[in-house]
Amino acid sequence: MQVVNATGSGLRTALSLDVPEGWRSEESTLYVDSRGDTTVKMTVVPPPAPALATLHARPRSGSVHVLDSSLRSLARAVVVPPPRGRCRESP
């Protein structure tokens, strides 16, 4: 996720993702300088079964109102597990 601080002072922001049941993601906290920006990589652990999901970003910055673009706050993910034991090599 890209975080941009348009305020006149540094800002501590907490980022989380709303993930479907059975998925896991941990919250990330960071500090962004005044008028600065940064990109944060978030780890998402999907279930072992194939799945299609939409992940929603949830930034929070205390009393500072957080603006996010609806197009940028969504991420679509397709998960396909590895084919362990399903494919055989031809002799």
Image: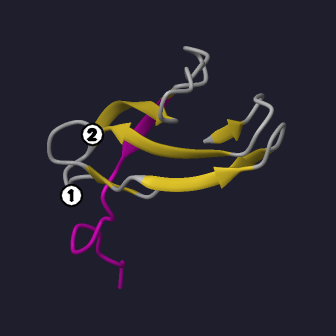
- Whole-percent x and y of residue 66? 56, 23
Magenta region: which residues?
75-91
List the single residue furthest toward the left.
21
Q: Amino acid at mark 2?
A: Ala
Identify which residue, 4 or 26, lies in the foreground.
Answer: 4
Answer left or right for 26 relative to 21: right
Q: Residue at x 56, y 26 (%)?
A: 64
Membership of 82 in magenta stretch: yes
Rendered image quadrant of residue 18: top left
Answer left or right for 51 relative to 54: left
The residue where tag 2 is placed is 51
Answer left or right for 53 relative to 56: left
**In the drawing, what numbered circle is on residue 71?**
none
Q: How many marks?
A: 2
Identify which residue, 82 or 89, lies in the foreground.
Answer: 82
Q: Residues within 10 Å of mark 1 (few under 14, many from 20)?
A: few
Question: Split into 4 quadrants, where in the image is the C terminus?
Answer: bottom left
- Whole-percent x and y of residue 87? 29, 69
Membership of 14 in magenta stretch: no
User: Measured along the vertical axis of the image, is residue 46 above or below residue 16?
Assistant: below
Q: Main secondary structure of the magenta part?
A: loop
Query: Can residue 9 be seen in the rendering of this structure?
Result: yes
- Whole-percent x and y of residue 10? 72, 45
List the single residue furthest toward the right.
35
Q: Residue at x 30, y 65 (%)?
A: 83
User: Measured along the vertical axis of the image, is residue 48 above or below residue 18?
Assistant: below
**In the drawing, what numbered circle is on residue 48?**
1
Using the numbered discs, state the Cα–Cα distance from disc 2 to disc 1 in whole angstroms.
9 Å
Q: Residue at x 39, y 52 (%)?
A: 27
Q: Residue at x 47, y 45 (%)?
A: 14
List the single residue furthest toward the top.
70
Q: Amino acid at mark 1?
A: Pro
